[in-house]
Amino acid sequence: MAAHAFSIDDIRAAAPTDAFDRGNKHHDDGRVRRLRADPGRVSALVEDGEDHAVRLRWETDTPSGACSCSAGAGWCDHAVALALAWLDGSDGDARTSAAAETPESPDLTGFLNSEDPTWLAEQLARVAGEDPVVWVRLAAASGSEAAVPAARDLLDEAVLGYRPGLPDGTPAGGEARLERAIGLLDELLDYGFADRVGELATDAAALHARRYPDASGDHAERLRKLAATAEELDQ
């Protein structure tokens, strides 16, 4: 990626005032450690009572921040501290590395097509054992009815674990988890489970409405549309 020039003033404008002030103090106190630069991003640990893993990633001239603290995403004080440490040139190599071209993604399709089917099956089984969403997808692809109750469990857990009041992108908010769970219903439709998807989507939409009656967002609407689509396909 091309080099992105930004300044302390840019960070000050992006971050809340209190977050900038705390981050500036973290930086002045030398709490930014293990600063590392990789193509397109810089990361570090920021000590603030406990270590927080922080990273900055470039999508525009001003990087976006993400942190393991409760703020999760955006410009928290730890992201500010990392940005200031990077800007002041405390690691000269960081600037060069972060501005380097991002390596091309590997040709995974070509690689997988060339591999032994037995080995591929072993890898898929391992991934499915570690990721329930992948397990449901593979079970649905195989035509197994076991995919349906497993998808219901994941969907219920995702709806109940969703926290719409938290900022977008915050891991604790459960946005990504809910999106993946709802996406399973599309998978089930594709694999011929329309008769069950209508029930799952309707129940999940009702649970979402009871749990978050005042929440904005398109999750409930997406669930209702999935239920309607499933009903049409099942006729």
Image (tube, rainbow, N blue to C red):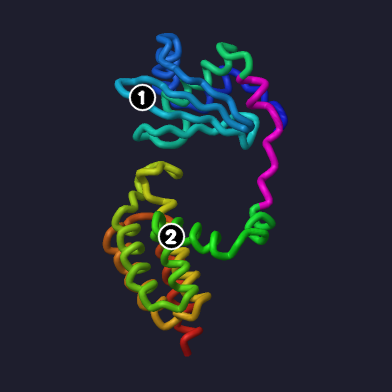
Report which quarter residue 217 is drawn in: bottom left
Q: How crowded is the residue under tag 2: few (<14 C-alpha within 10 Å), some, or many (20+)?
A: some
Residue 205 visible, this angle: no
Residue pictured at 70% horizontal, 42% vertical: 104
The residue range painted magenta reads 94-107
Q: Is residue 106 magenta?
A: yes
Query: What residue does disc 1 label?
Result: 51
Going by the numbered disc 1, the residue's amino acid type is Asp
**Secondary element at tag 2:** helix
In the rendered image, residue 90, in percent from the top left (x then y), is placed at 56, 11
Residue 147 visible, this angle: yes
Frontmost residue, 121 versus 167: 121
Going by the numbered disc 2, the residue's amino acid type is Ala
Frontmost residue, 159 versus 21: 159
In the rendered image, residue 1, in percent from the top left (x then y), is placed at 70, 33
Query: What residue does disc 2 label?
Result: 128
**Mark 2 vs mark 1: in front:** 2
**Secondary element at tag 1:** strand
